[in-house]
Image (tube, rainbow, N blue to C red):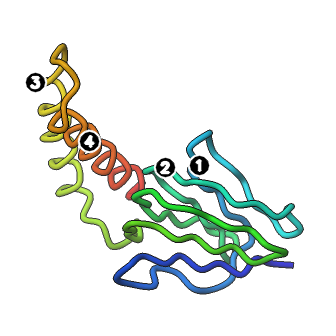
Amino acid sequence: MSLTLRVLAPDQSVFDGTAEEVILPSTTGLIGILPGHISLVTALDIGVMRVRTNGAWNSIALMGGFAEVEADDVTVLVNGAELGDSIDATTAEAELEQAKAKVSQMEGQEPSTEKIKAQQTFNRARARVQATK
């Protein structure tokens, strides 16, 4: 048995195929999906989705969204996504360091839109780095 997995972003179909197992970064923690999983809808956080196909694990950096599991069909709708294989690890690491520095500069400041944006940029950069590993 296998899962039918679709990962869709507004500008592209990131993944459309079968998988043996999927691990999703939900807003309440990681959720593992195997064939026969109970139906569910969950919000997704910025993070890394792991997909096992043909015994090998692949990573996809997700930028938040929703996932629906119905029978053995998994549909993931996200704000943005990148296959881990397509991310340049060196560039991603540099972007993470820049984002980390920006968040550190804002530490201790009152909450603001700029501070929230800096934290989101950091979270996206961290997900991209994690997806390369």
Q: What residue did someone put label 1 on?
A: 26
How far is disc 4 from disc 3 in space, using C-alphas?
Answer: 13 Å
Q: Is there a contact, CB below 8 Å, between mark 2 and mark 1?
A: yes
Give the Cα separation between the discs numbered 4 and 1. 18 Å
Mark 2 nearby-residue class (10 Å; few <14, some 14–19, many ≥20): many
Q: CA distance from mark 4 to mark 2?
A: 13 Å
Question: 128 or 112, which is in the foreground?
Answer: 112
- Quick one: label 4 or label 1, which is nearer the N terminus? 1
Alpha carbon separation for disc pair 2 and 1: 5 Å
- Residue 70 in picture, x, y percent from top left: 79, 73
- Circle 4: residue type: Phe
Q: Based on the displayed image, in which of its 4 quarters is residue 50 positioned?
A: bottom right
Q: Could you tell me the amino acid type at mark 1?
A: Ser
Residue at disc 3, secondary structure? helix
What mark, if any, has residue 105 been given in the picture?
3
Q: Position of residue 106 (x, y in %)?
A: 14, 24
Q: Compared with residue 126, is residue 9 higher up or lower down, i.e. above or below? A: below
Whole-angstrom CA distance, mark 3 to mark 1, is 29 Å
Q: What element does badge 2 sit on?
A: strand
